[in-house]
Amino acid sequence: MGMTIAEKILARHAGRDVVKPGEYVWCDVDGTGLIGPPSGLEALGVEKVYDPEKVWMVDDHFAPAPTPARAQTTKEMRRLAEKYQLNHWFEYGRHGILHQLFPENGYCVPGDLIVSIDSHSTSYGCFNAMGVPIMEELTYVVVTGRLWMRVPETIRFNIVGKLPEWCVGKDIILKIAGDYGTDCAIYKSIEFGGPVVSQLSLGSRFSMSNMGVELGAKCAIFECDDVTLEWLKGRIWREPNPASPDPDAVYEAVYDVDVTGMAPQVACPHDPGNVKPADEVEAMRVRVDQAFLGSCTNGRTEDYAMAAKVLKGKKIAPWVRCIVTPASQAIWLECAKNGIWETLAEAGCMITASTCGPCAGAHQGLLGDGEVCIGTNNRNFQGRMGSPESLVYLASPATVAASALTGYVTDPRPYL
């Protein structure tokens, strides 16, 4: 019996020829990341981590520190990074959101098993790596480099049909969340495939893997192709070991997602699966107070290029504040050099340093009672971005930019 991508990756890392869904296996991991101080290490008397080259640490959620308490936490992170000789500590100005930094610095290669703090570690699936979010297990992984796994069942989404010119991965993953529900893949491995995938940019695939966890998935993986390898070219220092599904791989379910004629998608409060076509939401005349372009989901150069295409030579609505937060310092620099920041700033946007702050409701963009935000982030849970009385809509960069322009949730197609 053949194996899926996730089963192949787990089998390799467990030293097995074959694994099957439901089995429990011990796996060696290729790396992990921290976004807070690993204080449990000292309490346990740990003197060193399993491999300083494979443990990364960055302060991304509160960068730079917005409160004295958080400044103390970050100070502790710096102390522990030095004590445990972590070679990959990313100081402000050389930093970014963990999930962007990992691949941007060549750490993640096809075929890897990455277990990392933060639920959106599923992002690494766009590189044909199995990215699994962990929490309390982190200390054990940092010390041993190993973790047990239950081999998940796999469901496959084949993306088929004719891709609309404006359509990006965010629209596709929202369409899937709306059609199949946010509980459709709980503890499953998602495999994305189908003929449309080859037309999707790496950034689009990143958005889809990133939001795989919003469907409940343990991981969300694409196959490796020329698009993957071209993006990684010059960044990675380890040989890729791509994993493809066997022709006779067994899936729990296989779904065809036809994107032909699909409208831009918008997730309405308070659930990423509460999805409607953008033109339908536009008809509801939802007035916007804040627009947010950023997060690990859609904080890349291609996202800002799309927003700039909508906003070039125009001004955002006077009652809208538009916050722009790149996923890394490298992206910030790239957008500065190619003029994207100038276009967005002239339109009235405020550009911040790289941080998870607005998306996570930590700082630089909190919402007040009754305020409405449309953002490119990955979650619109009640109260996530500030007041529990606020409302958050999720959409592609084009839809967010068009909404900032008109001041109401807006279908972007006339502006592209």
Image (tube, rainbow, N blue to C red):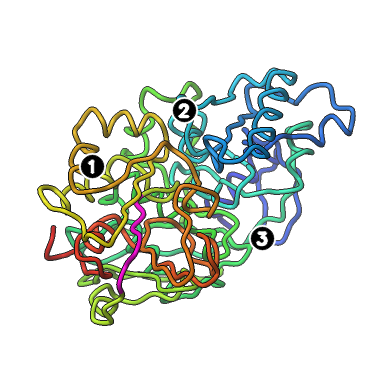
Considering depth in this image, is 31 or 19 the residue closer to the camera? 31
Identity of the amino acid at label 1?
Ala
Identity of the amino acid at label 2?
Gly
Provide the secondary structure element on which disc 3 rests.
loop
289 in the magenta segment? yes
Considering depth in this image, is 140 or 82 the residue closer to the camera? 82
- Answer with left or right where residue 181 lies relative to residue 260: right
Q: Position of residue 313 (x, y in %)?
A: 10, 48
Quarter of the image for residue 115 reads top right
Q: Residue at x 33, y 58 (%)?
A: 291
Q: Which stretch did the figure color magenta?
A: 287-293
Provide the secondary structure element on which disc 1 rests.
helix
Considering depth in this image, is 378 or 61 the residue closer to the camera? 61
| Residue 345 tag number | 1
Q: Residue at x 27, y 34 (%)?
A: 335
Distance (Cα) linking label 3 and label 1: 50 Å
Mark 3 — residue?
21
Quarter of the image for residue 375 reads bottom left
Task: Report whether residue 158 is seen.
Answer: no
**Nearer the observer, disc 1 or disc 2?**
1
Q: Earlier in the sequence, mark 3 or mark 1?
A: 3
